[in-house]
């Protein structure tokens, strides 16, 4: 049983560009959350998707958007990239709102030059 | 506004001894508190959790204590093993109307010395 997978593992972009990160949840999970982890910080909640809709959002600007597909996989899009967007982006999936069933992927390391 | 704080960025402990990792929070509305462990190049892995209505939860070598009046929780690892060396994140969760929002601390890097 594959866990949460994310692609790509690393990505380098320049300021002003747009990026799309992808996540496949663990089998049987229908809820996907995205987090940003800057260097030396803990993961910060970006948003959560359930039934193809964003149902919860953290303190991130509208440049951050997402999508969930019918197969529960998800994408995170970031427009007009800033240097400060450089971080590890983590995807987590869970089957429901149980607090201890959130499984994280290995993350995508985004570097903005 | 850092609602979940881990004030010790690192901790070194001898193998076989107790490791105590601390966490403070400011939001009294948190419903659950969780600890995650993270190895390099991997995502965080859930370790143990505690409901806000309890004061202790134990799972093998791991015990989490919650002191609501002090808004403080701690993770005890006994005995510590070299494989426990990792970054530990404290996290707190609000469950509201079926929604789940998790707030993480900044992490404590634990090194267990053989």
Image (spheres, helix red, strand yellow):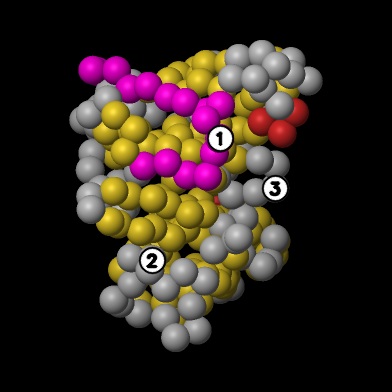
Query: A91 or A19: which is nearer to us?
Result: A19
Q: Chain of mark 2?
A: B
| Start-end of magenta stretch | A56-71
Provide the secondary structure element on which disc 2 rests.
loop
Q: Which mark is residue A40?
A: 3
Q: How far is disc 1 from disc 2 in space, using C-alphas?
A: 24 Å
The residue to which callout 1 is attached is A61
Depth check, front residue: B74 or B98: B98
Dot 3 lies on which element? loop
Spot occupied by residue B94 in the image (x, y as percentages of width and height): 35, 59
The residue that appears at 65% across and 20% down in the rendered structure is: A80
Give the residue displayed 43% in from the left and 20% down from the top.
A75
Question: Residue at image x 29%, y 48%?
Answer: B99
Q: CA distance from mark 1 to mark 3?
A: 21 Å
Q: Which residue is label 2 attached to?
A: B30
Screen quadrant of the N terminus of chain A: top left
């Amino acid at each position: 049983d594959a866990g949460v997978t994310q692609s790509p593992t690393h990505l380098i972009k320049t300021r002003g560009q747009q990026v799309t990160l992808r996540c496949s949840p663990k089998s049987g999970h229908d809820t996907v959350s995205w987090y940003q982890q800057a260097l030396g910080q803990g993961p910060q909640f970006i948003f959560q998707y359930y039934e193809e809709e964003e149902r919860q959002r953290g303190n991130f600007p509208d440049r951050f958007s997402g999508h969930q597909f019918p197969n529960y996989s998800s994408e995170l899009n970031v427009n007009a990239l800033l240097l400060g967007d450089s971080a590890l982006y983590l995807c987590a999936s869970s089957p429901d709102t149980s607090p201890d069933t959130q499984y994280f992927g290995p993350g995508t390391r985004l570097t903005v030059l | 506004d850092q609602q979940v704080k881990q004030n010790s960025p690192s901790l070194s402990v001898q193998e076989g001894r107790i490791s105590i990792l601390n966490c403070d929070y400011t939001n009294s509305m948190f419903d659950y508190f969780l600890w995650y462990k993270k190895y390099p190049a991997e995502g965080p892995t859930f370790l143990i959790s505690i409901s806000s209505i309890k004061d202790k939860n134990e799972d093998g070598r791991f015990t989490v204590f919650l002191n609501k009046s002090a808004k403080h929780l701690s993770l005890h690892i006994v005995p510590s093993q070299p494989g426990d060396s990792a970054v530990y994140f404290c996290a707190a969760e609000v469950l509201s109307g079926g929604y789940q929002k998790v707030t993480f601390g900044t992490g404590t890097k634990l090194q267990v010395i053989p």
